[in-house]
Image (tube, rainbow, N blue to C red):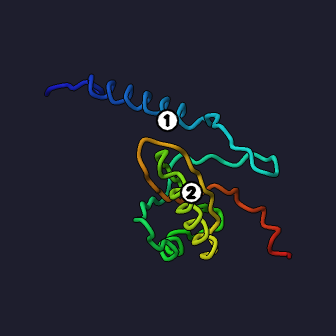
Amino acid sequence: MILRAASGWQTATADLALILFLITAQAVREEQPTPAIATQSGTPAPVASSALALHRPAQGEDVREWLLATVTDERQVATISVSYTRERRAYALAEGERLLGEAEAAGVAARLVAMPDARDDTVIAVDYLREEGDGTNLAR
């Protein structure tokens, strides 16, 4: 009869790997401080880490249907980011205003961010930027 050890180097390595995983998971889980953007009311707005949906509309494209299909929660906000070269600033701002108007017509909360850049670009990002309500709106 051959006697075997109850555990070998594989078991010890697996145990150490599991311990390392648990320590790493705990470190990642701890809440990291995030910068906040101040709103008009003075309360900080939550800062998003990644978008739920992105869309690069073509010039003059109607984005109302895309917004209606994408924004499914009142906590979601569409951020319209317009970057422009110096020569096309007026056009880029007009396009941003047009897209902002389409979002308002669709009943979607939206904000417009315009910034100078080396190239012209327009991106619409949808993300959870509003805090969840406290539930008291049901009694109104």
Q: Is residue 136 left or right of residue 14?
A: right
Q: How many marks?
A: 2
Percent across and percent down for residue 71 are 55, 69
Residue highlighted by disc 2? 93
Percent across and percent down for residue 72 are 56, 71
- Which secondary structure lies at badge 1? helix
Percent across and percent down for residue 24 are 48, 31
Q: Residue at x 55, y 55 (%)?
A: 90
Are the residues at dot 2 and dot 1 in contact (C-beta closer than 8 Å)? no
Q: Residue at x 54, y 31 (%)?
A: 27
Percent across and percent down for residue 120 are 43, 51
Q: Nearer the viewer, residue 138 or 61?
A: 61
* Quarter of the rendering containing residue 132: bottom right
Work out which quarter of the rendered image holds the N terminus and state it: top left
* Quarter of the rendering containing residue 104: bottom right
Q: Is residue 88 left or right of residue 78?
A: left
Closer to us: mark 2 or mark 1?
2
Q: Nearer the viewer, residue 120 or 89?
A: 89
- Which secondary structure lies at badge 2? helix
Indicate the amino acid at tag 2: Leu
Q: Residue furthest right?
A: 140
Residue highlighted by disc 1? 25
Indicate the amino acid at tag 1: Ala
Of the numbered discs 2 and 1, the one sitting upstream in the chain is 1
